[in-house]
Image (cartoon, rainbow, N blue to C red):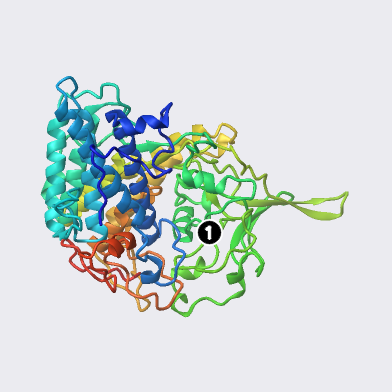
Amino acid sequence: MIFAFTLAAGITFNSCETLELEQVDNPNQLTEADPDLLLNSIQLSYRNAVTTFNNVGSQLSRIEYMSGRNYFNTWGSGTLDGAWTNLYANIVPDIAAIQEIDAASEDVDLSFHVGVSKIMEAHLLMLFVDYIGDIPYSQINQPDEFPNPTVDNDEEVYASARALLAEAKSLLNGASIGTGTDFYYDGDADAWIKLANTLLMRADLTVGNYSAVINATNVIEDSADDFEFAYGTNANSPDTRHPDYASDYRSDGANLYRSNWLINLMAGSYGDYFEDDDPRRRYYFYRQNAITPGNITVLYNQDTDSYSIISGAPNGETLSCSLETVPSQLEFTPDEDYWCSAKLGYWGRMHGDDDGIPPDNFTRTAVGVYPAGGNFDDHDDFITTYYDAEEDDDVFVTYTNRLALGAGGGGAGIEPIMLSSYVEFMRAEAYMAQSNPTAAAAALEDGITESITKVVAFGSLDGGADSSYAPDETRIQTFIDDMVAEFESASTTTGLDGFGWPVDKDKMDILGEQYFVALYGAGADAFNFIRRTGYPRTLARNVEINPGPFPRTLLYPSGEVSSNPNLNQRTDNATQVFWDNGVTNPAN
């Protein structure tokens, strides 16, 4: 049963997460159906739901670490429970309540409230279709007539979402927020209209309407119009910090693992020593460790002014896989270099690693200043050694760990949802689909440039960092130029070797990798990209030799299945949504 709360029955809010940033003096006011408070609730419920999709999409696409070996078991029926509740039990009835208030009074115009709310509803409807397929829509929020709504055809729900976006644009034309609070665009109706156009562009890309993507106008094209939720620095009652910051910047050390695949991709050959080092690396990740068991780093000998490569000794207590042999399916593949540990002191985990939790909280790589509002990584990419005559021994100097409660940006990060850089990558994909690699290269360049510009600006949040470690303009431009040159020189398609890896990266491999790097902190649309294109083929393989089929869709939320007899649970993850042509990725 999809619950509906009507105005006549009073509006109730039973999620502390939904209310955590609510700016109210008296919680009892919530029962008075204040449209401004309803709008607040809708915005926060939307953020909570999008965060779920970002987390799931990031893990499936290797942007973040996935902790389960078997895909079906990892993404069980509880995966989208919270997001489902946020849409169907919170957002949809709250929108209906605002519309009732608007219709009942000639003294107020709530066009802004309704318009922005319908944009958020439309986005979530499309995400649920993308991740599940057929979902209830036409019968929802009508408990008397339809206490147990049936599902609608997924393509029809997509069309309904598009209609909501068109309606929202009309409502927002000249609308004012009045006394309300807009957590995203501060009451800028024109910015919301750009978002609606961008979501229509996203829908066109998803279904393969590439000409519409290329010709889309009045969309998000500047960072000033980026659609994101800004977190704060308050740690208690309520905790307004970025949730990843709250997990990692603690007295007991970091509690999350970063993705070894993304770390390895961004660190290039040897970090700062080669121009393939991604300028965003030090903003994304914060190291607590100088050398990781079973992997390499650079040793600088101060006495001889020379550099060499050294390996970290295995450590069964903190990294048990450092004592294990490479899984057979990863031997002789690029994954062999980082399946267990990462170079240059990075400490993450491989896709599918379900090992237990060792005492590694003070060595794990933590979230950085972007997007979580943590520390900028101002550590050397090497360990310094010199001979101490007084001690008659070699001294090894690493660095001071700044991970602590309140460190860096204090958690004042963002939840990226739709950024200008993403729009450029969508255009690049559309150009490639239309066999226009020249235009795709230009869009790729714009996407990388806009992503780096945004990320680098977050460095100012960490006032205690040594800014000399930040990449300068020359280094940044060199990286961008090299990536574009690599894309331009790459073949349109390349074959696979005997282990299922591309013999060389082709254009879509490069485009996909750079899109995923830019999506760090978001990631919901990366899952679509993989199923839509089959790229990038360079994704990390699962450490499990037989992880089961890669999901085409996820299961229906368990809470809804148990209460709604008209919703039948799936027994596998193979159902394809209407736009999914079944393209596979060899990494899966």
> Horizontal and vertical percent for residue 453?
39, 37
Foreground residue, 234 or 435?
234
Up-down relation of residue 113 to residue 203 (above or below): above
- Name the residue at 56% across, 77% down: 325
Up-down relation of residue 319 to residue 102 (above or below): below
Foreground residue, 46 or 283?
46
- Name the residue at 48% across, 60% down: 260
Question: In this image, 280 relative to 176: left or right?
Answer: right
Residue type marked 1: Gly
Question: In this image, 550 relative to 580: left or right?
Answer: right
Question: In this image, 58 relative to 287: left or right?
Answer: left
Question: In this image, 122 relative to 447: left or right?
Answer: left
Q: Which quadrant, please, contains the N terminus?
A: bottom left
Q: Quadrant of residue 534?
A: bottom left
Foreground residue, 77 or 28?
28
Residue annotated with mark 1? 348
| Residue 339 in view (yes/no) | yes
Q: Quadrant of residue 501?
A: bottom left
> Horizontal and vertical percent for residue 217?
15, 37
Foreground residue, 306 or 127?
127
